[in-house]
Amino acid sequence: MTNFFQFEADFVDSLRCIPMQVRMKLDTCGTKLKLTHWHQFTQEERQELVEKPCTTVEEIQTYREDIQNLVINHTGTPASDLPIEDNPAWMDATTIPPTVQEKVQELGVSLTLQNWASLTSTQRFALIKLSRPSHENKNFLPALKEFQLV
């Protein structure tokens, strides 16, 4: 899966930021990768993390081990762990998370449950990440437009 979102276009050629598909894999394998870690990786290592699968139990474990090995090799210490959700919100097409609902209301946009259900899990993941209060949020509206929700 190397399809990037259009709202990521300003950085995907150089992979200077962690793309959404890698962030989703990190959440899936329970690893907190800092941008400072990402910047220490080579271009080839970053591209490998983009392309490496992370869906089956074995792939998730391998992805986690590979990330930890990269971080340890570059920094000397492992990356922090993240809790792994049994039922992550991006996999639930029947419930719009509160942060996403708040963000669309803030923008004066309507997001129906039918719209939410029509999105891919990766699109839902992106909207959840982009709606978090701690996130910059500048790409939330471009994502809504890209996903044809406005």
Image: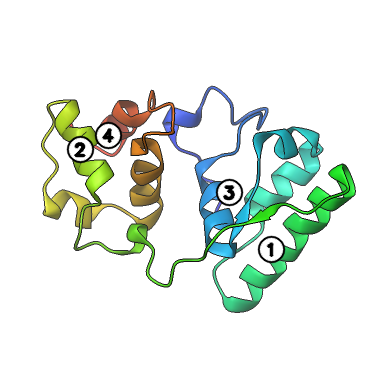
- Helix, strand or loop at label 1? It is helix
Mark-to-mark CA distance, 1 and 4: 30 Å
Question: The disc labelled 2 sits on which kind of residue?
Answer: Glu
Which residue is found at the position 58% from the left and 26% from the top? 11
Q: Earlier in the sequence, mark 1 or mark 4?
A: 1
Question: Residue extending furthest bottom?
Answer: 57
Mark-to-mark CA distance, 2 and 3: 25 Å
Which residue is found at the position 12% from the left and 26% from the top? 108
Question: Which residue bears the numbered disc 2?
Answer: 102
Which residue is found at the position 88% from the left and 48% from the top? 76
- Tell me where residue 64 appears, x and y as whole percent: 69, 63
- Tell me where residue 14 appears, x and y as whole percent: 68, 27
Question: The disc labelled 4 sits on which kind of residue?
Answer: Leu
- Helix, strand or loop at label 4? It is helix
Please indicate whether residue 26 sits to the left or right of residue 48 in the image.
left
- Helix, strand or loop at label 2? It is helix
Which image quadrant: the C terminus? top left
Mark-to-mark CA distance, 4 and 2: 14 Å
Mark-to-mark CA distance, 3 and 1: 12 Å
Mark 2 touches mark 1? (CB < 8 Å): no
Residue 113 visible in this rendered orientation of the protein? yes
Q: Earlier in the sequence, mark 3 or mark 4?
A: 3
Determine which of the numbered discs, if any, sits on residue 64 in the image: 1
Mark 3 touches mark 4? (CB < 8 Å): no
Question: Which residue bears the numbered disc 4?
Answer: 144
